[in-house]
Image: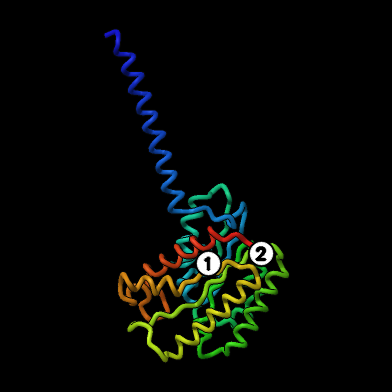
Amino acid sequence: MTYMPKRRRTSDRSRWWVGVFLTLISTALLAAEYPDVPVFKENARVLFQGDSITDGNRGRNEDPNHILGHGYCFIIAAQYGARYPERKLTFLNRGISGNKVTDLATRWQKDTLDLKPDVLSILIGINDSGHVPLEQYEEVYDKLLADAQAANPNLQFILCEPFYLPKDGHKEGDEREQDVKKRQAIVAKLAAKYHAALVKLQKVFDDACKRAPAQYWIWDAVHPTYSGHQLMAEEWIRTVSQFQGP
Protein backbone atom coordinates (compact mmCIF):
# COMPACT_ATOMS: atom_id res chain seq x y z
CA MET A 1 0.00 0.00 0.00
CA THR A 2 2.85 2.38 0.75
CA TYR A 3 4.06 2.15 -2.85
CA MET A 4 0.75 2.83 -4.60
CA PRO A 5 1.06 6.65 -4.68
CA LYS A 6 4.53 6.35 -6.13
CA ARG A 7 3.30 4.04 -8.91
CA ARG A 8 0.51 6.45 -9.74
CA ARG A 9 2.97 9.32 -10.03
CA THR A 10 5.21 7.23 -12.26
CA SER A 11 2.23 6.28 -14.42
CA ASP A 12 1.15 9.92 -14.69
CA ARG A 13 4.68 10.92 -15.59
CA SER A 14 4.85 8.20 -18.25
CA ARG A 15 1.58 9.28 -19.78
CA TRP A 16 2.84 12.87 -19.85
CA TRP A 17 6.00 11.87 -21.69
CA VAL A 18 4.00 9.75 -24.13
CA GLY A 19 1.77 12.76 -24.78
CA VAL A 20 4.78 14.99 -25.39
CA PHE A 21 6.29 12.40 -27.73
CA LEU A 22 3.07 12.01 -29.75
CA THR A 23 2.71 15.79 -29.99
CA LEU A 24 6.24 16.14 -31.33
CA ILE A 25 5.68 13.35 -33.84
CA SER A 26 2.39 14.80 -35.07
CA THR A 27 3.95 18.27 -35.35
CA ALA A 28 6.86 16.87 -37.36
CA LEU A 29 4.51 14.97 -39.68
CA LEU A 30 2.37 18.07 -40.20
CA ALA A 31 5.43 20.17 -41.01
CA ALA A 32 6.61 17.56 -43.51
CA GLU A 33 3.20 17.38 -45.17
CA TYR A 34 2.56 21.13 -45.15
CA PRO A 35 5.88 22.99 -45.37
CA ASP A 36 5.99 26.62 -44.36
CA VAL A 37 5.30 29.07 -47.19
CA PRO A 38 7.27 32.24 -46.41
CA VAL A 39 5.21 34.42 -48.77
CA PHE A 40 2.16 33.69 -46.61
CA LYS A 41 2.95 36.53 -44.23
CA GLU A 42 0.53 37.96 -41.69
CA ASN A 43 -2.53 39.58 -43.30
CA ALA A 44 -1.35 38.54 -46.78
CA ARG A 45 -3.88 38.66 -49.60
CA VAL A 46 -3.29 35.75 -51.98
CA LEU A 47 -4.96 36.06 -55.39
CA PHE A 48 -5.31 33.23 -57.92
CA GLN A 49 -5.87 34.43 -61.48
CA GLY A 50 -6.42 32.55 -64.72
CA ASP A 51 -8.84 30.53 -66.82
CA SER A 52 -11.21 27.58 -66.19
CA ILE A 53 -8.53 25.50 -64.47
CA THR A 54 -8.25 28.20 -61.83
CA ASP A 55 -11.95 29.10 -61.94
CA GLY A 56 -12.88 25.61 -60.75
CA ASN A 57 -16.59 26.45 -60.98
CA ARG A 58 -16.15 29.01 -58.21
CA GLY A 59 -19.12 30.84 -56.78
CA ARG A 60 -19.80 34.44 -57.72
CA ASN A 61 -21.10 35.46 -54.30
CA GLU A 62 -19.73 35.43 -50.75
CA ASP A 63 -20.74 31.82 -49.96
CA PRO A 64 -17.53 30.48 -48.34
CA ASN A 65 -18.33 26.92 -49.39
CA HIS A 66 -17.85 27.70 -53.05
CA ILE A 67 -16.06 31.04 -53.33
CA LEU A 68 -12.67 29.51 -54.21
CA GLY A 69 -13.96 26.87 -56.59
CA HIS A 70 -13.19 23.17 -56.42
CA GLY A 71 -9.63 22.90 -57.67
CA TYR A 72 -6.03 23.49 -56.71
CA CYS A 73 -6.77 26.97 -55.31
CA PHE A 74 -9.26 25.53 -52.84
CA ILE A 75 -6.83 22.80 -51.76
CA ILE A 76 -4.03 25.29 -51.10
CA ALA A 77 -6.29 27.74 -49.27
CA ALA A 78 -7.90 24.99 -47.18
CA GLN A 79 -4.57 23.58 -46.03
CA TYR A 80 -2.90 26.86 -45.17
CA GLY A 81 -5.96 28.69 -43.95
CA ALA A 82 -6.34 25.91 -41.38
CA ARG A 83 -2.65 25.74 -40.56
CA TYR A 84 -2.09 29.48 -40.11
CA PRO A 85 -5.28 30.99 -38.66
CA GLU A 86 -3.16 33.45 -36.66
CA ARG A 87 -1.76 34.91 -39.89
CA LYS A 88 -5.21 36.04 -41.01
CA LEU A 89 -4.59 35.07 -44.63
CA THR A 90 -7.12 36.03 -47.31
CA PHE A 91 -7.41 33.79 -50.38
CA LEU A 92 -9.14 35.10 -53.50
CA ASN A 93 -9.96 33.47 -56.82
CA ARG A 94 -10.73 35.47 -59.95
CA GLY A 95 -10.14 32.81 -62.60
CA ILE A 96 -12.75 32.84 -65.38
CA SER A 97 -13.47 29.91 -67.66
CA GLY A 98 -12.40 30.40 -71.27
CA ASN A 99 -10.09 33.30 -70.56
CA LYS A 100 -7.02 34.11 -72.61
CA VAL A 101 -4.31 36.55 -71.61
CA THR A 102 -6.12 39.23 -73.61
CA ASP A 103 -9.22 38.65 -71.49
CA LEU A 104 -7.15 39.11 -68.35
CA ALA A 105 -6.03 42.46 -69.74
CA THR A 106 -9.60 43.73 -70.09
CA ARG A 107 -10.41 43.00 -66.44
CA TRP A 108 -6.97 43.45 -64.87
CA GLN A 109 -7.80 46.66 -63.03
CA LYS A 110 -11.02 45.40 -61.41
CA ASP A 111 -10.10 41.77 -60.84
CA THR A 112 -6.44 42.18 -59.90
CA LEU A 113 -5.12 45.66 -59.16
CA ASP A 114 -8.17 46.83 -57.22
CA LEU A 115 -7.95 43.75 -54.99
CA LYS A 116 -4.45 44.79 -53.84
CA PRO A 117 -2.89 41.33 -53.59
CA ASP A 118 0.39 40.65 -51.78
CA VAL A 119 0.81 37.32 -53.60
CA LEU A 120 -0.40 36.88 -57.18
CA SER A 121 -0.57 33.41 -58.74
CA ILE A 122 -1.32 33.25 -62.48
CA LEU A 123 -2.09 30.30 -64.75
CA ILE A 124 -2.96 31.36 -68.31
CA GLY A 125 -2.09 30.14 -71.77
CA ILE A 126 -3.92 26.99 -72.81
CA ASN A 127 -6.83 28.95 -74.33
CA ASP A 128 -4.36 31.29 -76.05
CA SER A 129 -2.97 28.36 -78.02
CA GLY A 130 -4.22 28.67 -81.57
CA HIS A 131 -5.86 32.05 -80.89
CA VAL A 132 -3.33 34.52 -79.53
CA PRO A 133 0.01 34.73 -81.39
CA LEU A 134 3.07 33.98 -79.29
CA GLU A 135 4.42 37.51 -79.60
CA GLN A 136 1.15 39.02 -78.44
CA TYR A 137 0.88 36.49 -75.61
CA GLU A 138 4.28 37.52 -74.28
CA GLU A 139 3.69 41.25 -74.79
CA VAL A 140 0.32 41.32 -73.03
CA TYR A 141 1.45 39.01 -70.21
CA ASP A 142 4.53 41.17 -69.68
CA LYS A 143 2.43 44.33 -69.42
CA LEU A 144 0.06 42.73 -66.92
CA LEU A 145 2.97 41.88 -64.66
CA ALA A 146 4.54 45.29 -65.10
CA ASP A 147 1.28 47.04 -64.19
CA ALA A 148 0.82 44.84 -61.12
CA GLN A 149 4.37 45.47 -59.99
CA ALA A 150 3.96 49.20 -60.46
CA ALA A 151 0.85 49.11 -58.27
CA ASN A 152 2.69 47.13 -55.58
CA PRO A 153 6.50 46.96 -55.83
CA ASN A 154 6.54 44.30 -53.10
CA LEU A 155 4.09 42.03 -54.90
CA GLN A 156 5.24 38.41 -55.07
CA PHE A 157 4.45 36.70 -58.38
CA ILE A 158 3.87 32.98 -58.80
CA LEU A 159 3.67 31.98 -62.45
CA CYS A 160 2.27 28.56 -63.34
CA GLU A 161 3.22 27.21 -66.75
CA PRO A 162 0.35 26.11 -69.00
CA PHE A 163 0.24 22.38 -69.68
CA TYR A 164 -1.22 19.91 -72.16
CA LEU A 165 -1.72 16.17 -71.75
CA PRO A 166 -3.21 14.37 -74.78
CA LYS A 167 -5.34 11.33 -73.95
CA ASP A 168 -3.23 9.08 -76.17
CA GLY A 169 0.08 10.44 -74.96
CA HIS A 170 2.49 12.91 -76.50
CA LYS A 171 2.98 12.55 -80.24
CA GLU A 172 5.63 14.06 -82.44
CA GLY A 173 4.16 16.71 -84.71
CA ASP A 174 1.26 17.65 -82.42
CA GLU A 175 0.96 21.35 -83.26
CA ARG A 176 -0.92 22.31 -80.13
CA GLU A 177 1.60 20.55 -77.94
CA GLN A 178 4.46 22.38 -79.63
CA ASP A 179 2.64 25.69 -79.26
CA VAL A 180 2.05 25.10 -75.54
CA LYS A 181 5.74 24.29 -75.07
CA LYS A 182 6.63 27.67 -76.57
CA ARG A 183 4.23 29.37 -74.16
CA GLN A 184 5.84 27.50 -71.29
CA ALA A 185 9.17 28.97 -72.36
CA ILE A 186 7.63 32.46 -72.41
CA VAL A 187 6.27 32.03 -68.89
CA ALA A 188 9.70 30.86 -67.70
CA LYS A 189 11.26 33.94 -69.31
CA LEU A 190 8.78 36.25 -67.59
CA ALA A 191 9.28 34.47 -64.27
CA ALA A 192 12.99 35.19 -64.49
CA LYS A 193 12.36 38.83 -65.45
CA TYR A 194 9.99 39.48 -62.55
CA HIS A 195 11.74 37.29 -59.96
CA ALA A 196 8.69 35.05 -59.77
CA ALA A 197 8.33 31.52 -58.47
CA LEU A 198 7.84 29.25 -61.49
CA VAL A 199 5.51 26.28 -61.00
CA LYS A 200 6.42 23.69 -63.64
CA LEU A 201 3.29 21.62 -64.10
CA GLN A 202 3.96 19.81 -67.37
CA LYS A 203 6.58 17.50 -65.88
CA VAL A 204 4.32 16.80 -62.91
CA PHE A 205 1.61 15.44 -65.18
CA ASP A 206 4.04 13.65 -67.49
CA ASP A 207 5.57 11.87 -64.51
CA ALA A 208 2.13 11.05 -63.11
CA CYS A 209 1.33 9.16 -66.32
CA LYS A 210 3.88 6.55 -65.27
CA ARG A 211 1.49 5.67 -62.44
CA ALA A 212 -1.90 5.99 -64.16
CA PRO A 213 -3.24 6.86 -67.65
CA ALA A 214 -3.46 10.48 -68.76
CA GLN A 215 -7.25 10.54 -68.38
CA TYR A 216 -6.88 9.76 -64.69
CA TRP A 217 -5.14 13.09 -64.18
CA ILE A 218 -6.55 15.26 -67.00
CA TRP A 219 -9.76 13.99 -68.52
CA ASP A 220 -9.82 16.02 -71.75
CA ALA A 221 -6.14 16.92 -72.31
CA VAL A 222 -6.70 20.32 -70.64
CA HIS A 223 -8.82 20.14 -67.46
CA PRO A 224 -7.49 18.20 -64.47
CA THR A 225 -9.57 15.74 -62.48
CA TYR A 226 -9.69 16.09 -58.69
CA SER A 227 -6.58 13.91 -58.56
CA GLY A 228 -4.89 16.21 -61.06
CA HIS A 229 -5.79 19.27 -59.03
CA GLN A 230 -4.20 17.65 -56.00
CA LEU A 231 -0.97 17.21 -57.99
CA MET A 232 -1.12 20.87 -58.98
CA ALA A 233 -1.61 21.98 -55.38
CA GLU A 234 1.28 19.84 -54.18
CA GLU A 235 3.64 21.20 -56.83
CA TRP A 236 2.51 24.78 -56.17
CA ILE A 237 3.19 24.34 -52.46
CA ARG A 238 6.53 22.60 -53.06
CA THR A 239 7.73 25.29 -55.44
CA VAL A 240 6.54 28.29 -53.47
CA SER A 241 7.73 26.96 -50.10
CA GLN A 242 11.25 26.52 -51.52
CA PHE A 243 11.30 29.83 -53.39
CA GLN A 244 13.96 32.17 -52.04
CA GLY A 245 12.70 35.36 -53.66
CA PRO A 246 14.73 37.88 -55.68
Q: Amino acid at mark 2?
A: Leu
Please count the marks in the image. 2
Direction from residue 25 to residue 243 in the image, left or right: right
Residue 155: give its label.
2
- Mark 1 lies on residue: 61
Question: Where is residue 106 shown, x and y percent of the image?
Answer: 63, 81
Q: Is residue 88 above or below residue 68?
A: above
- Residue at the front extreme, as displayed: 172
Q: Is residue 4 visible?
A: yes
User: Looking at the image, is 233 positioned above or below residue 190?
Assistant: above
Examine the rendered structure and indicate whether residue 159 appears above or below residue 28.
below
Q: Residue at x 37, y 81 (%)?
A: 220
Residue drawn at x 60%, y 59% as measured from the top left = 244
Q: Is residue 66 visible?
A: no
Quadrant of res 170 = bottom left
Classed neighbour count for the residue bearing mark 1: other residues with Cα under 10 Å, few (<14), some (14–19), many (≥20): few
Circle 1: element type: loop
Quadrant of the snapshot with the N terminus = top left
- Callout 2 crowding tier (Cα within 10 Å): few <14, some 14–19, many ≥20: some
Q: CA distance from mark 1 to mark 2?
A: 26 Å
Return the residue nearer the eye: 95 or 242: 242
Q: Nearer the viewer, residue 111 or 136?
A: 136
Res 215 → quadrant: bottom left
Q: Position of residue 202 (x, y in %)?
A: 45, 75
Residue drawn at the location 42% of the way across and 91% of the way down: 173
